Image: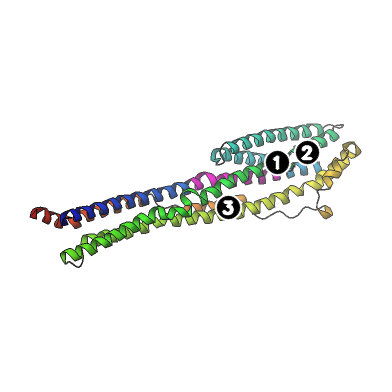
Amino acid sequence: MSTLRRLLRLRFWLLTATVVATIAALATFAGIQATVAEVRARTAPAVLEVVAAQDALVKADNAVVTSFATGQVELIGPGERHQSELVIARQSLTQVAEHNAAGTEGSRALQVVEGLLADYANFVEQADAHYRQDDGRMLGTADLWYASRLMHQPENGILGRLGALAELQHTALRDQLSGGWLAVAVVPLWLLPALALLGLLGYAQFRLRRKFRRRWNFWLLGATGLLAGMIVTTSFAFGSASDARDAGGSVDTAVASWREGTAAGAAQGRPKLVELLRAHCGQDCGGVVAELAAGVPDGGAAPPASTGDPADDGGRIDDQLDSADVPAFAEYLIAGFGLVIAGLVVAGFHYRIEEYRFRS
């Protein structure tokens, strides 16, 4: 094979490797950034909003039980706290519908929860209306128990279904943070083509030095330096992925804390509801009072609620995800590296190829 053909073939493989390495780096960088943006804009908020809705509903239910237990219901109805927490819960569920990352299954679960929440609100309104009547306190207390049962039933209650919905959203978050463009297997996708190009540039230096007795081809040296810049720039995306996983860990911690708080808060209204049933329902309620009393912690006092605050935790996680974002101009930088590397490769071979063409 003639020297001219060897030079042309080596230049061709260098240019091909440059194109492949640049495309792989761009695809990897863009894929990781798109996934991190999806986590920040949809998936993480969906998880947090579901748990925030649970927190608000527990507070709303406790507020209405307190209103009935203290007799304030005769003056102010279920109470402003109850109404405001219901509004917060509905707003959170609206956000979940917008950010839903669990697909059709998540949408169906959300529709069921919204239907149950409407029934719960109706029971509370009926309890309020009956309790204001002189002979309607037993009916009002029964309606309140129906509302509480609809809220707290282990699997089919509102809180239980919201827990299942939160797990669906949480599973989608875990899948995004451990699969797709954030999977470990993505690393070779861009690193191997870059290393292959690096090896070809080293081989080209070796061949040209042997053939033309020149120690260095400075055009190819420049291409090697820019390739190092491309590798470093692309690696920033993996730092972003690591930051997103850290934020996912913060979501796990916050959700665990809020669930403890929800369970503790859900128990706080139970003793008051038991006393209401005993006072106004008595033996007419059958085994309802005994069933409800069995769930009251020893001593009749509820465990202390968790100190986790959904608003504070959500803001902290948002900050973590914002810091995981890499500026969009990095993609243009990677593309620019690829173009300049290709230009330097062409320039590095141009003089020798033209020399042999002239001789031919």
Q: CA distance from mark 1 to mark 3?
A: 27 Å
Between 225 and 125, the residue placed more toward the observer is 225
Q: Which residue is mark 1?
A: 82
| Chain part drawn in magenta | 38-60
Q: Which residue is mark 3?
A: 251
65 vs 249: above or below: above
Q: Which residue is mark 2?
A: 73
Numbered circles on residues, count: 3
Q: Position of residue 190 (x, y in %)?
A: 38, 53
12 relative to 64 in the view: left or right: left
Residue 343, visible in the rendered structure:
no
Front of the two marks 1 and 3 = 3
Q: CA distance from mark 2 to mark 1?
A: 11 Å
239 relative to 84 in the view: left or right: left
Three-letter code for the amino acid on which mark 3 is drawn = Val
Q: Is residue 59 magenta?
A: yes
189 relative to 275 in the view: left or right: left
